[in-house]
Amino acid sequence: MPNLLSSSINISEEAFLEIIFKSDWEKPSLLFSASNQPSARFKIFAANPTKTKKINNSKDIEALKSAQDFKEIEEINKQVASPFTTGWIGYFEYPQALPNTPADQIHGEFHYHNWSLVFDREKQTCYLNSQLSSDEHEALQFKIEKLAQQSNLKTEFKCSSFEPIWSKAEYQSAFEQVQVYLKAGDCYQINLTQPHQAQYSGDIKQCINRIANKLSPEFAAYFEAEEATLLSASPERFIEIQNHIIETKPIKGTIKSSDHPDSCQQELINQLSNSEKDKAENLMIVDLLRNDLGKISDTGSVNVEKLFDIESHPYVHHMVSTIKAKKTRGISNPEAILSCFPGGSITGAPKKRAMEIINELEAMARSAYCGSLGYFSDNGRCDFNILIRTLEFKPVNETGTGQVYCWGGGGITVASEMESEYQESLDKVTKLMKIIESKKAI
């Protein structure tokens, strides 16, 4: 990697999220957290990529590897605190066809950025990192500081009401078929999801602050790809790799929060925490991910650090476990991500058979939904979410309108009840859809 320049830059946290609106950036990317969780420390903005890479096979993935060896990476990380400096930002789609190996038919898109703006919420400091010349770096810093002082030029955004693509009867039919497979012993758990669609017009970026303020997502992202724009309010980390330590945080177990006082919230948290059904589902996925991590980690290093932890988000509470391991030397970050991809929390167990059943039963291809979005930084770090609570905007047509899709779902076991699972699939995404719906439909 060329010499890295890093300088502090005078921008408030509020102004940071507004920068994306204030210039004609090409293919801007924004990775941000609005929650109060300890992991929600950094916000990352990058734009004007120097390279774009469409991912269609394993050879394409080779291009995402960092050229640095372990010692060089350690030196870079001593100098720069930012999790992302320069590198690739992008996403992998959920694989619809089952390949012999995950890399054979994986699809996605990544943009290479030779500069980034990173806001450290803990220190309330913003850093500009770049591979630019000194003059170019200073000019970009001056531009960004000027932009931060300008008014936000907003373009109107409109969205019609979302409509389910499946009827409740169609969901029930798929649910019942899932039960047939579960009772036959094909799987222990199968993740069943259903899509919703609406029409939109205007600037999608106008939804970013709405979602940040209302949902406080922990692993949120905005990404402009060739075939779609993704706006994710994900609460779930897929995999982070930092200093060769891998962390994954699967969510399995959800209960709707209460609009009533804190005492009612605590009752719901206790209910989820003591749910034997949810703990059994969570443990199935923990075991699956321990096995996935074991393939890319040093022997004996896979450790469940937190089991059945409860995390509270606006509108829902989740049961979350945390697993860590030490990545085996010689395995690149892209190889590590794809060896575990897609995340077990959104497939089921065993993964291969669950994915076959999902492909057979669901109403439409998941596309980016349940894939992963994140970065491969030149400093050796990477971090990817699971693309749940995610909106996928297709390009507008000649009339100026486009389609937007949103999926919701959950893990089904033999102990699941259709009505409660159907309602849970709605509870997870109804607020997200309502946030971007306009009072005046298009």
Image (cartoon, helix red, strand yellow):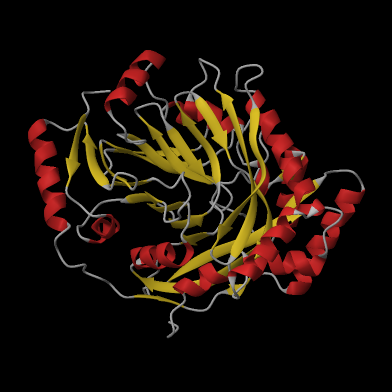
Dividing the picture into quadrants, the one containing residue 375 is top left
At a point 60% along the width and 75% down the height, the residue shown is 260
> In the visual, does 383 lie left or right of 261?
left
- How many marks overall? 0
> In the visual, does 236 lie left or right of 279?
left
**Residue at the outermost bottom position:** 440
Does 71 sit above or below residue 170? above
> In the visual, does 73 lie left or right of 196?
left
The reply to whether residue 252 is in sight is yes
Quarter of the image with the N terminus is: top left
At a point 45% along the width and 83% down the height, the residue shown is 441
Quarter of the image with the C terminus is: bottom left
Q: Which of 243 and 239 is in front in this view?
A: 243
Q: Nearer the viewer, residue 102 or 12?
A: 12
Q: Residue 140: x and y, percent?
A: 14, 44
Q: Residue 122: x and y, percent?
A: 34, 45
> In the visual, does 433 lie left or right of 52?
right
**Residue at the outermost right position:** 184
Q: Residue 364: x and y, percent?
A: 64, 59
Q: Nearer the viewer, residue 5 or 153?
A: 5
At a point 10% along the width and 39% down the height, the residue shown is 138
**Residue at the outermost front position:** 263
At a point 26% along the width and 60% down the height, the residue shown is 18
Does 204 sit above or below residue 295? below
Q: Which of 183 and 244 is in front in this view?
A: 244
Q: Residue 317: x and y, percent?
A: 62, 59
The reply to whether residue 92 is in sight is no
